[in-house]
Amino acid sequence: MDVFPIIVPFCNKLKSINFYLVRYQDSLILIDAGMDTEDCWHSLQEILKENHYTLTDISAILLTHHHTDHIGLVNRIVSANPIPVYAHPRAIPILQRDSEYIKMREEFFRNLYRRMGCGKFGDRQVIDLHNPILLTEDKKIECEIQVAQDLLFDFDILDIPGHAPDQIAFYNRKCKWLFSGDLLIAHMDINAFIEPYLDGVRTNSLIQQKHSLEKCISLNVEFIFSGHGDILQNPVNILKERIIGLDEKAKIYLNIIKSGISTGNDIARLRFNERYEKQFFNIMSEIIGYLDYLEIQGEINKEMENGIWQYY
Ligand SMILES: [Zn+2]
């Protein structure tokens, strides 16, 4: 198995958008598909050309999760070269912008933000929900999507939810290579986004994130091919650091609650000040993630008062 990384510089904290061409036997497989930008498109063409391939040599696309910075070129590639596209079953209605799902998701966040005490400001954010993870109609995947399961092209398909409920990794045992989307980014902490499952139940995204990191440690991976930033060799220490970091942050939230701040909204405003309004979706995701985490560990409890959860 050979890998040809496509690393496209990106001018925000993500540093780069990474996706990967992999040669396996006679097949050329694309793992993730970058963003829908000319930069990503040209970088793909360049790497193909450097290695004496063209677009029509790609025989399948595997997607780690539904976020738009990982699926961007799917429509362009498939319209020029109709090949199968694989993703987790949970990703499929999201990628296809299923109207029932979009409606359910809006309702889910409206209720969630109200219960967190975000009031009218939270209600207004729901209208903007398409923004943060861009579930806009123009990013809809037009082709049929196959379910990625068990073994595909010598990759074990591993569930690694947390960053997204549908996140999967592609693991080649022989090379000990793991293509893991946004499970681990070398230079930054990743967000474990709160999302509904397809049935509307809330994900325990931070707990899932921790379990996914632990799963990755147990594999003894030699290389992690990340969705952003550097490719990581022997990543065990950095994986362990991330788990420790997660528990340290949980202590900060526990102390805030011990000081008497009791709603998700008040915790967010206290900890993030003016960033709260600008990065509402990410910040509330983090707060709710840690509240769930502390609650499941038995460190805190909650009670509903006038429709708002009070944590203590
Ligand atoms: Zn990403």
Image (cartoon, rainbow, N blue to C red):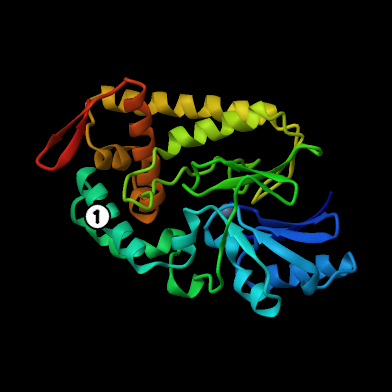
**In the picture, residue 235 is in which quadrant?**
top right
Does residue 7 appear in this view?
no
Residue 62: x percent and y percent? 65, 57
* Residue lying at 68% horizontally and 68% vertically, measured from the top left: 40
* Residue lying at 63% horizontally and 45% vertically, measured from the top left: 150
Residue 78: x percent and y percent? 65, 74
**In the picture, residue 26 is in which quadrant?**
bottom right
Indicate left or right for 306 with 35 as reference. Answer: left
Foreground: 118 or 233? 233
Foreground: 94 or 12? 94
**Residue that sits furthest to the left in the current view:** 306
* Residue lying at 58% horizontally and 28% vertically, measured from the top left: 214
Residue 8: x percent and y percent? 71, 61
Q: Is residue 118 above or below residue 19?
A: above
Foreground: 151 or 176? 151
Indicate left or right for 144 with 180 as reference. Answer: left
Residue 147: x percent and y percent? 56, 56
Total numbered badges shown on the rendered structure:
1
Q: Amino acid at mark 1?
A: Arg
Which residue is labeled 1 in the image? 110
Indicate left or right for 246 with 219 as reference. Answer: left
Does residue 240 appear in this view?
yes
Crowding near pointer 1: few (<14 within 10 Å), some, many (20+)? many
**In the picture, residue 291 is in which quadrant?**
top left
* Residue lying at 32% horizontally and 65% vertically, measured from the top left: 100
- Quarter holding the C terminus is top left
**Residue that sits furthest to the bottom in the current view:** 80
Look at the numbered disc 1 and give the secondary structure of its residue.
helix
**Residue that sits furthest to the front in the current view:** 150
Mark 1 CB within 8 Å of ligand 1: no
Q: Is residue 248 above or below residue 172?
A: above
